[in-house]
Image (tube, rainbow, N blue to C red):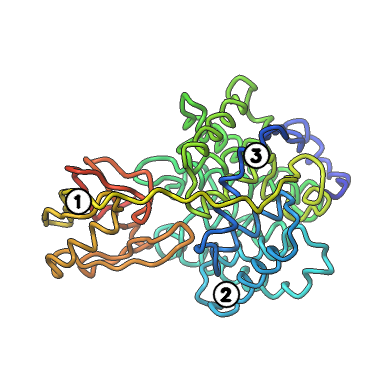
Amino acid sequence: MRQSHQLPLVGLLLFSLIPSQLCTICEVSKENHSRLNPLLSTVIHSKYARGIQAANVLLSLRLVGIQDQNLEQQLFREVRDSSEKKGSDLTSGQLALVILALRACQNSDESVTYFHLVSQLEEKFQKEIENMGVHDGNPLTNYYQLSLDVLTLCLFNGSYSITEVKKYFTPENKNFYFGGQFSVDTGAMAVLALTCVKRSIMNKQIQKNGEDLQHINNYTESLVKKILSEKKENGLIGNIYSTGEAMQALFVSSNYYNKNEWNCQQTLDTVLKEISQGAFHMPTAAAQILPALMGKTYLDVNNVSSCASGPGHLNISIHEPITVEPTISPTSISVNYTVQINETFFTEVTVPKGSVFLDVMEEAQKINQTAFRFTFVESSWGPYITSVQGLAENHNDRTYWQLLSGGEPVSQGVGRYVVHNGENLEVRWSKY
């Protein structure tokens, strides 16, 4: 981090109100590094760590300092070639992730050829803002991606408006909520973005006054409180998949909460237990939790010395044998499947034991194409439902297809949630 320059008078008056930039972190001890092997096997050997999805893996491995030149070059080519192929079809958040991955832990002279990507992100970010202006504050994508945009533009000297950040990143903004529930990973990404903006202001990389600094400070404090309010008794924050980014946010905002409000070691212990029980099967999920377990955050991506050595350097073999999952029994199970729009469509579906939600939807579609037809896209988190009966999700209207079991939202995606005999599954047209 660059040395701070002298602040103007109003900045000096506010300086005592601004938490320091020192971070409080905890990380997996060197003795327990071997417990991370299942994560490494997932991110390295999975066939799904390809294309844009490989950006999460490349970013994660660079942050934690795993040295394997062949693997890094392979992932680098995957991300670069896929981003060039998709071009303008990338969402703003996908492009931001690509930039973070390609430029993470690289000297400035090694990344000069990717300045054009930052310019493209500036344009995509501005389109998000323009869409919010004409569609009741709704971005083209979502606030997680919007926060990722700001973080990336801030880290790599892109252009963005502090005025727009102040306007749209108020903690009570509806876009921080999903179905009335505060979104922990969205809030965490916003904290990382706001922390970067605050540091840029204080380092005089951005010429703004003390009032801007105070707004950023207040927003961060409020978001941190909301994140901590979602902490569970076992230490997880939100759910198992949002915990990694929540940890990153809490690492860089330790002066906004008291030590007794978060037991980081308890969170680490619970995550390690979840890993041993087979959590984080998806490469994206494994890649997102890994940096936090090693005491790293996305704010470290342009700190070459931090990536290369010091705390968080993962010095273990990545060529671990892949665990072969046991063969699934061919026994069939029966589940109830419902599509709920303005009316209800129901059918009973028989699928092999071990099937996932998507398998049920595909079988239902075979039974009644009109009532149960659907479309999906492949995302970094696996298949994502985009339409049912031809009715497509719409970000401007804040509508989407919600997956439920027994009337409650499922905790995993349509391609990962394993169904059980007699289960009542539902796809419901919803607003967030």
Q: Is residue 420 left or right of residue 214?
A: left
- Say which residue appears at 32% left-offset and 57% top-offset: 400
Frontmost of labels 3 and 2 is 3
Instruction: Give the residue pinned by disc 2.
Output: 82
Amino acid type, residue under disc 2 in the picture? Ser
Vertical placement of residue 9 versus 61, above or below: above
Q: CA distance from mark 3 to mark 2?
A: 32 Å
Residue 220 at x, y percent in the picture: 61, 39
Q: Which mark is residue 8?
A: none
Quadrant of the rendered image containing residue 113: bottom right
Label 3 neighbour load within 10 Å: few <14, some 14-19, many 20+: few
Q: Is residue 145 left or right of residue 317?
A: left
Amino acid type, residue under disc 1 in the picture? Ser
Frontmost of labels 2 and 1 is 1
Instruction: Give the residue pinned by disc 3.
Output: 34
- Say which residue appears at 80% left-offset and 48% top-offset: 306
Residue toward you, 23 or 34:
34
